[in-house]
Amino acid sequence: MQILIFTFFVIYTILLFLITWLTSRKANNQTYFTGNRKSPWFIVAYGMIGSSLSGVTFMSVPGDVATTSFTYFCVVLGYILGYLAVAFLLLPLYYRLRLTSIYEYLNGRIGNEAHKTGSILFIISRLLGSALRMYLVIYVLHIFIFSNWGIPIWVTAVVMIAIILLYTFQGGLKTVVWTDTLQTTFMIIALVITIVVIFKDMHIDFGSLWHNMEQQGLTKIFDTDWRKPTFYLKQVLGGMFITIAMTGLDQDMMQKNLSCKSLKDARKNMLSFTGILVFVNALFLLLGGMLILYAQQKGVNLAGMPTDRIYPELAFHYLGTFVSIVFVIGLISAGYSSADGTFTALTTSICYDIIHIEKRVSTDRRQLWVRRCVHFGISLLFLAVILIAAQYHNDALIRIIFMVAGYTYGPLLGLFAFGMFTKRQVRHPALIPLLSVVIPLLCWLLSHYSEQLLWGYKFGFEILILNGGLQFLMLLAISRKGDIIEDKKTKV
């Protein structure tokens, strides 16, 4: 079976490079950074599904149904509100200023310290978060496939990162937009095929299946216990602000939106993407309930098994060779679509926010050389994070790194809110980097001890709101009334 899976992996890789060749011909720096602002909105919308649903989501959302039922759907409902805010508040701002990096806005509105802080927060968060998501994909492939051939995990990591580096190196964003459509397609195919195979193997109709899930409490969506992280209001608000912060204030996701021809197209992209995303997440939750019932029917003991191992365990050992193949291709697709955009977005942020390539590098040829060096350097950093995680792999380490990555979006939320909803200027801009470290740390301490301090209350996704809110309030406290800073590009 491993040989067959590897064969399909090679075929899939060839398809990726075929798309790369077609999209990277005559590519220049503008092709790499903006896709020449000619991306079809419906292609961007469809491809962004794969970017939003990483390999971790591919495994975790179905698996978490075992412990949290369908309560994750409240987060998805919050996504809808968040995407509406992005479409009607943030996209008009970015298009009006014709930004390449969205953090250039902070420079024009608040100042250089805010600009650098915002971009560095994004770089740290995306590098850690995306590399860890890719590592977990590599880890699953290693455990279930490549370890059987005696291939060390570092070899798998090097090969996967080299593939991503090569197919994004020339065409950048334009290539990513089109390869993401392929990857989204394979991910959805894997999801649908798994559902169909389970249906057939269980010999059950949908009505009976749903009734059995209801009987076991798996279909519960609204948790009314305010102390739990899954409390429905926490989930909805958390989902909304996660979307605003991790999509609307994230260079990776916004760079794809900004490659559309116009604001109108970008809005159509965002709204259609929202509808598709809700439907796909609902399918993942349905799959989660089906996997649990299937395991019970087959006598598979899930007790003590990490929830994100449920899907791969059943796919590889119980659902047959065909499902194993589509699972692997779907998992790789989810991993690639999350990582490839990160390479391009991090390169863009470093070039425009840190190096200021358009101002400090005079010729196109020199800019091309700088961009390629940065892109290659990002791939090495990405690989380094993966290899460190592999060397010191444990669940606690991974949770800590994901937590650090998640907390960095709070200060970004506060910075953009201050810039957009006030006309004040920060009196001591040098304090902005300090606040952006201290406030997330205080939020972590509060979250860690919240049960003792807040009568059993446990923070969930809403910790992001607190994080951003405190940043906003502290910026207000050190600000004054005054004229808004302007420059030629980021006039607000």
Image (cartoon, grey):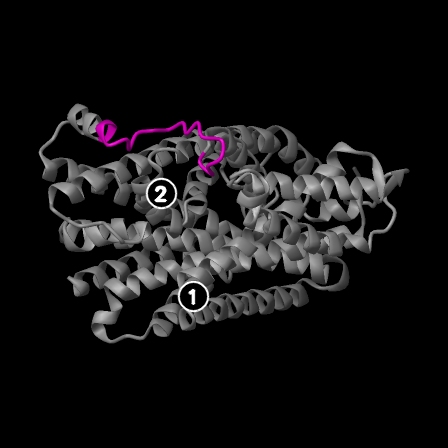
How far across and how far down the image is residue 56, in percent? 39, 51
Q: CA distance from mark 2 to mark 1?
A: 25 Å
Residue 322 falls left or right of residue 214: left
Residue 100 falls left or right of residue 281: right
Residue 457 falls left or right of residue 437: left
Q: Nearer the viewer, residue 461 or 184?
A: 461
Where 165 falls versus 435 (above or below)? below
Magenta stretch contains residue 331: no
| Mark closer to the observer (2, 1) | 2
Residue 253 falls left or right of residue 391: right
What span is colored magenta in the figure? 213-230
Which amino acid type is shown beneath numbered disc 2?
A: Val
**Rendered residue at 61%/38% (across/down):** 465
Res. 377 mark = none
How far across and how far down the image is residue 304, in percent? 27, 53
* Residue wearing tag 2: 61
Q: Can residue 208 be spotted in the picture?
A: yes
The N terminus lies in which quarter of the figure? Answer: bottom left
Which amino acid type is shown beneath numbered disc 1?
A: Ile
How far across and how far down the image is residue 258, in percent? 59, 41
Q: Nearer the viewer, residue 149 or 184?
A: 149
* Residue wearing tag 1: 161
Sequence order check, earlier mark of 2 and 1: 2
How far across and how far down the image is residue 82, in percent? 55, 32
**Rendered residue at 18%/50% (across/down):** 301
| SS at circle 1 | helix
